Image (cartoon, grey):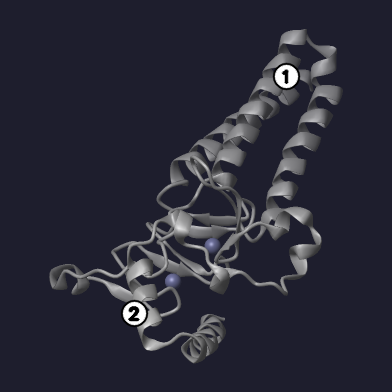
Amino acid sequence: MRGGAKEVHEETREEDRETINEDEEDALVVTMTNSSLQDFADDEYTTPTDPCRCFCWCNYRKIGQSYVVREEGPIILVGPHWIGVLVTLALIVVSTILFIDQQCSQLNGWYTLASLACASITIYFLFQTTCTDPGIVPRGTIQTDPAIIAHCSYCDICDVHQQRGTEHCDDCGVCIENYDHHCPWMGKCIGKKNMKWFQLFNMAWVLYLVFVIAITMQNA
Ligand SMILES: [Zn+2]
Ligand SMILES: [Zn+2]
């Protein structure tokens, strides 16, 4: 899969060479080297033939395979497997409705409020995880210090020097700092910047599950 992405990337670079003269190419490299995440996505990263473009929000700018929903302030990114987020959300909402209807309705109203609070906190952490930049390394992040380069590997898809912990995700099409894994349930990678939200999400749903099991056993 990575090999395929590499071929596509190399084809794109070939096309670039045909259209950009030497001076312009030098200027482009300098610009990319100094790019911030906001500058990361460019036309090269946009795929006009993306089948998801039938959804209006998928016309948003892309970074790798992730969609940039908001650019001002903290950037909001939705991962390529955003349908997985909807499945996760549906599981939480449906489970909560069934739990309140079948277990809490026969108890004091505080139990219903407690389960709604647990569900709300879990959903809040879910969206923090799924909307936060996982730690994407801007394309063209090249190190100049030979001492640092000696400890880096190089991603020829993103044109970046990967520091320790950074890995390329084929699903997201970008390099991620402190890459942990690509989570289909969260629709994106878990990395340096959204790891704390992912851990809080896991704690929230586990505590919620313990609460549900305890009440269900009490009612049995
Ligand atoms: Zn990469
Ligand atoms: Zn990923």
Q: Residues within 10 Å of mark 2 (few under 14, many from 20)?
A: few
Left or right: 84 in relation to 11 = right
Give the residue type that dot 2 points to: Asp
Residue at 61% x, 59% y: name it: 61
Q: The C terminus appears in which quarter of the rendering?
A: top right
Left or right: 135 in relation to 12 = left
Residue at 50% x, 85% y: name it: 16
Instruction: Tell me where residue 55 sits by quadrant.
Output: bottom right
Tag on residue 218? 1
Report the front residue among 32 and 181. 32
Q: To which residue does mark 2 refer?
A: 26
Give the residue type that dot 1 points to: Gln
Q: Earlier in the sequence, mark 2 or mark 1?
A: 2
Residue 210 makes an appearance in the image: no
Helix, strand or loop at mark 1: helix
Helix, strand or loop at mark 2: helix
Instruction: Tell me where residue 58 sits by quadrant.
Output: bottom right
Report the front residue among 137 and 212. 137
